[in-house]
Amino acid sequence: MKKIEKMIIVCDAPDHGGKTKLCQHLIEKYRFNYYHCGVQPDIKKYHGDVLDLVFDDVRNYKSNFVIDRLHLSEEVYGNIFRNGAAYDWKKLNDHIIEEAKEDGIKYVLITCLPPKNIVVEGHAARNADGNEMFSTVDKVYDAYENIYMESKDNLQIYKYDFTDDPNYEKLDQYLESL
């Protein structure tokens, strides 16, 4: 196993897409620090504050961080369940790329997109138990898929599918090659 240094990963996906398990893998295998972004009243400021905290920690302590949900979630969930996103996710992503580059920090954007039926069925099962905020993830999944398809060539989004890589071997090879 190659040691990974000074890396920030943003892991985003529809509910039940596998992002939290992927984050747990990064924490256990590579000792990443973890931050989960939930819903906050001033989401734009909150996300900016989270990024300031994460960048400071990576710069000062040369640690690694994985952020569970950030700008893609705001884009998707904001547009589907509210009156639009609070900010332009592409501008924030460009800012993250630039700041990481200036500081010699590796930045990876991962979207977890296993087959849609698995996500929808898993979400429905959790929803039946009362453990979900939203009644469906159909539109959410499609929105993530659209972002990935529209941006994969120019943003280098890594698409993770736990049904294709259940032991994270492909993901580990990719991260260790950076």
Image (cartoon, rainbow, N blue to C red):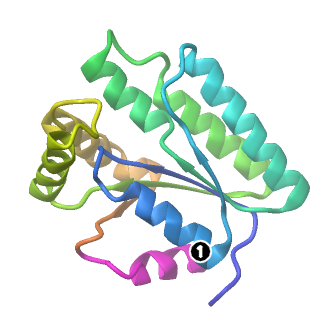
| Residue 5 among those drawn in magenta | no
Residue 62 image offset from top left, x and y in percent: 83, 62
Q: Which residue does the image show at 44% across and 75% down from the upper left? A: 171
> Which residues are the magenta region?
164-178
* Quarter placement of the C terminus: bottom right
Quadrant location of residue 30?
bottom right
Q: Which residue does the image show at 63% across and 45% down from the upper left? A: 97
Seen from the viewer's position, the closer of residues 148 and 13 is 13
Query: Does residue 2 appear left or right of residue 149 in this picture?
Result: right
Q: Which residue does the image show at 36% across and 52% down from the upper left? A: 152
Quadrant location of residue 143?
top left
Residue 139 image offset from top left, x and y in percent: 16, 33
Q: Is residue 115 above or below residue 38?
A: below
Q: Is residue 144 above or below residue 39?
A: below
Task: Name the amino acid type tagged 1.
Answer: Glu
Specify few, some or many for label 1: CA neighbours under 10 Å numbering under 14, 14-19, or 20 or more.
few
**Residue with the mark numbered 1:** 28
Furthest residue toward top:
83
Query: Does residue 38 appear left or right of residue 73 in this picture?
Result: right
